[in-house]
Amino acid sequence: MKRNFYRNLFDILNLNGEAFVVTVIKGAYNGSSVIGQKLLKSKEKIFIENENIKDFWDRNLSNVDFTKGTYILALENEIELFIEHIIGQLDLVICGGGHIALPLCKMAKMIGFNITIIDDREGFVNKNRFPMADNILCKNFDEAFREIKFNRNIYFVLVTKGHKDDKKCLEIILKNDFHYVGMLGSKGKIAYVINSMLENGYTKEDVDKVHTPIGLEIGANTPAEIAISILGEIIKVKNESPIINIENDIFDGILERDEPKILATIIEKHGSGPRGVGTKMLINKNKSFIGTVGGGKVENAVYEKALELIESKKSILKQYDLSNSVSAKLGMACGGSIKVLFEFIE
C-alpha cells in the first residue's frame, strides 16, 4: 500500500506540481495504532492509503486547513496529524542565453532545479553551450512560452537581450501561475518596461510581483557573481514558504527497490536543529540510504533506529533532544530538538 501511495503522489506532483499529504503521527482506530497512515489530496481528488480506515478520515479530515502549508494538527481523542504541502520538481526558466545565463544554469542545476533556456539566437542556446540544461527552446518567446507548463513551482529569470523581449515575457508570465519572476537590467530599462506594463493595463499589484532589480545586494560584478546573487534571492523566496520538495532519488528508492525500508521524516523542529521540517532520509534493509536528516551522530542515531524498525516492521515517532547533556551524548552542540517520523515501507 505504501509504495502504491507514493506512486500516486509522484504522478500527481508531475501532473499538478503540488499536493498535500496528511500523515497520522499519533492516534488509534478501533483499538489499533494508525501511526504512519496517509491521505493524499490533490486539486481533483483524495486518495486514502488504507480504505479500511476510511471512517477515521471521514471524521477528521474536515479539521484540516489546507491553506496553512506544512504543520502539525492536534485533534481530540489524542490524534495528531502531520500535514505536508509538497511540491514537485522545481523548474527554472531562464529567458535569454547570454553571459549570465550560463553560470546561473550551472549553479541552479547543482541545487536541483529543472532548467529551461529560451532564446531565439541559435548561437546562444544550443546543447554544446548548455549541456546541463534539461530543455532548450531556440525560438521566439511567444512560441516558446506555449511549451511552458505554468504552476506554482516555476521560477523565471529574465536576462534577455533587450527591453522588448523582457516586456513580452512579463506580459505572458504575469497572466499565469508562477512562484518567482525577476528581471535584470539598468534603472532606465527597468523603468521603461514597468511603465509600459502599467500603460497597457497591468496593475501595480501585477508589476510588484516582479523582483527588480533582481538578486541580493552583495555587490556582484562578474557574471558568476551576478548569478550567485540571483540564485541567492531565488533560494530565499523558495524557503520563505512552508513547503516540501521530495528528491527524485527518494522517490526512485521507494518505487524501484522491492526490499523493506524506512522513510525518516523530520516533522517538528525546535531551536537550532540540523535540518528543516519535511527533510527526509530513506534507509534500506541492505543498510544503504538516500538523503539526510542532518549528518553527524544524530543522523547515525536515526539510521540505527531505522534498521531496528525494518526488522520489527513498525512505524513510530521519536524525539531527539539536541541540548545540554543529551546533546553531548549525540555529539551535537546546536541545541533544540527534532521529532522524526519513522515510516515502514514494504
Image (cartoon, helix red, strand yellow):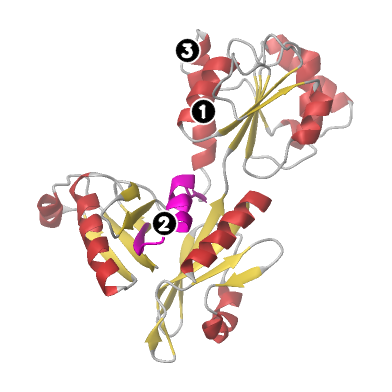
CA gap, disc 2 and disc 1: 29 Å
Q: Name the element at disc 1.
A: helix
Q: Residues in magenta?
A: 243-265
Residue ID at (35%, 64%) = 260
Q: Is residue 167 within the magenta segment? A: no
Which one is earlier in the sequence, the residue at label 2 or at label 1?
1
Compared to residue 160, the image places residue 179 above or below, namely: below
- The residue type indicated by label 3 comes to Gly
Q: Nearer the viewer, mark 3 or mark 2?
A: 2
For label 3, count other residues whose C-alpha is less than 10 Å away and answer few (under 14), some (14-19) or many (20+). Answer: few
- The residue type indicated by label 1 comes to Ala
Most foreground residue, 256 or 176: 256
Most foreground residue, 313 or 213: 313
CB atoms of marks 3 and 1 within 8 Å: no
Classify residue 85 by image quadrant.
Answer: bottom right
Q: Determine which residue is flagged by label 2.
A: 257
Give how far across and how far down residue 340 sits, in percent: 32, 61
Q: Determine which residue is flagged by label 3.
A: 219
Q: Nearer the viewer, mark 2 or mark 1?
A: 2
Q: Determine which residue is flagged by label 1.
A: 108
Tell me if I can see residue 222 in this picture.
yes
Compared to residue 213, the image places residue 71 above or below, namely: below
Q: Nearer the viewer, mark 3 or mark 1?
A: 1
Q: Is residue 245 within the magenta segment? A: yes
- The residue type indicated by label 2 comes to Arg
Q: Residue furthest right?
A: 200
Classify residue 114 by image quadrant.
Answer: top right
Classify residue 161 by image quadrant.
Answer: top right
Residue ID at (10%, 55%) = 325
Compared to residue 170, the image places residue 287 above or below, namely: below
CA gap, disc 3 and disc 2: 47 Å
